[in-house]
Image: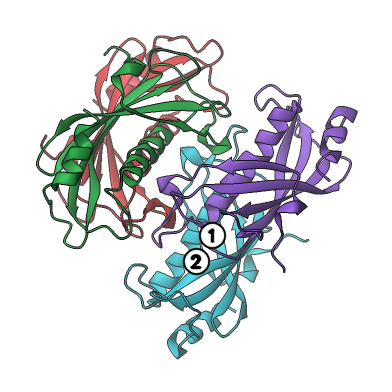
Chain colours: A cyan, B purple, C green, D red
């Protein structure tokens, strides 16, 4: 799999690394990348106004995630994260994420994150409304 | 993708969930599963005698991970984790993992975890020795 | 401060350490001890039948914590955790915790954890009922 | 204990909260505050040029931590963290930390973090050199 470049992505945030992100081997642990994916996706959803985690009638449950690691990242460096949408279904969406350092054009790591949106109470899939779908389309 | 059954796996451990494993939605967060994969694989390596994390001349770096989530898991329940090996290369190995609850025959979640083994100092790939390869073959 | 001994504590659990509990320096990170305190206290509350985290009308909020670290702990070792109660107020309780390894009589680390119990909706302090107070008294 | 005000502190950083910082009750978990303390102290040490975590001959081990929680913090809000030094010994230092939100003058949480500096190999206490002591004094 080839390393994605910055221009693939539509929404960006700079991730502040933490002391604890590094593991015994001195680099960011593989599981920590997924906590960044979670924050990146949810930050975008919250900023866009389509999610209020504790009050929305529709929330996203994660059904599939994955990551390829090409080059290590380490605290205390800052990491640039990029987000785009690869597929929109009736109630599910596949986000793709790239992580970049310094002026690297190619991702140090890249992954995917599939959300199924459900009714917050019943936890059954609930199709996207127009506002949500329109927001997702801006990331395609 | 179909849900794996218990008999696919060769090595098992019971994972003790923690208060903090659950996120705002009351279930184990998707990233936490990968901390379990890490512990499962490393527990097996350490018990088998092929890895001493801070002293071994050869250590494993993670290059690819993924997980599918079929049914939620939640603290305080205990989780049964199963491990097997799907592919052994010269210096890399693809582990597969299933997570089970109670008497479920089918996995609540399943994933993969690819390690490349490298020289601990140079961090360059280093082929498996006989002892390591023989140990990995018991998980195929 | 002197190191507590095992007999100070009334309730025990064995904590399963995780790969990620160790930080860059190869020992369990200071913050991780608090995730163990959280699990120890909540495990006891749940087992005793006085708390169901997502459904109880009364939940505990943490208002004060502390820990002294006397000797390092490291993944993959198992850790024995002991819990007792040092003070019971109207709606608050001070738990004390000791962490032990192997056959050590003296704690490797010890700490405190103060919960104020509140109404789950209003988040205002709510005095202990008889069942809860009686349960807490068994840990004094 | 009274809530500290912003002017008590000498060094500041804005902490980016993460989805996973919140626990089941919808607020930042008590243990997460300590991961912030760790990052705050180490960021300052690294920026000041007195610590390179994996290469320094002298590293800090944590021997005592504590935190009081006055008002909840929650992802996705940003948190302002302040750091000062309350006591400098031969080889140990007591840092104090305050966490603030928005335009609050009083801390939402405050804590301490005691480091003993040791030789990175022997892990025995090693007195501060002049450069390190001078740096610490700027935070008093």
Q: What residue is shown at x 59% (from left), y 34% (from top)?
A: A26
In-front residue for pair B112/C129: C129
- Give the image quarter of residue C111: top left
**Would you call the spot at circle 2 few (<14 residues within 10 Å), some (14-19), or many (20 or more)?**
many
- Give the image quarter of residue D55: top right
Q: Locate residue C99, reporting x and y percent.
A: 40, 24
User: Residue D13: in sight, yes or no?
Assistant: yes
In-front residue for pair B12/A12: B12
Q: Chain of mark 2?
A: A
Horizontal side of A132 relative to A102 (left or right) equals left
Counting labels gives 2
Residue B102 higher or lower than D125, as above or below: below
Q: Are marks 1 and 2 in contact (CB under 8 Å)?
A: yes
Q: Specify the label residue A37 is tagged with.
A: 1
Quarter holding the C terminus of chain D is top left
Q: Specify the label residue B115 is tagged with.
A: none
Q: Chain of mark 1?
A: A
Q: What residue is shown at x 44% (from left), y 51% (from top)?
A: B75
* Residue that carries the numbered disc 2 in the rendered image: A41
Residue A128 higher or lower than C119, as above or below: below
Quarter holding the N terminus of chain D is top left
Q: Locate residue A12, reporting x and y percent.
A: 51, 65
Horizontal side of A1 relative to A43 (left or right) equals right
Q: Locate residue A116, reporting x and y percent.
A: 54, 74
Horizontal side of D134 relative to A13 (left or right) equals left
Instruction: Give the secondary structure at mark 2.
Output: helix
């Amino acid at each position: 799999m080839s390393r994605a470049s910055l221009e693939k992505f539509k929404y960006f945030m700079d991730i502040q690394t933490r002391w604890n992100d590094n593991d015994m081997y001195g680099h960011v642990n593989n599981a920590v990348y997924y906590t960044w994916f979670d924050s990146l996706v949810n930050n975008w959803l919250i900023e866009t106004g389509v999610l209020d985690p504790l009050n929305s009638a529709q929330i996203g449950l994660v059904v599939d995630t994955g990551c390829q690691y090409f080059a290590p990242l380490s605290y205390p460096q800052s990491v640039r994260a990029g987000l785009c949408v690869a597929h929109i279904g009736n109630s599910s969406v596949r986000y793709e994420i790239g992580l970049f350092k310094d002026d690297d054009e190619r991702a140090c790591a890249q992954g995917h994150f599939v959300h199924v949106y459900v009714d917050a109470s019943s936890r059954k899939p609930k199709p996207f409304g127009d506002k949500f779908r329109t927001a997702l389309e801006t990331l395609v």
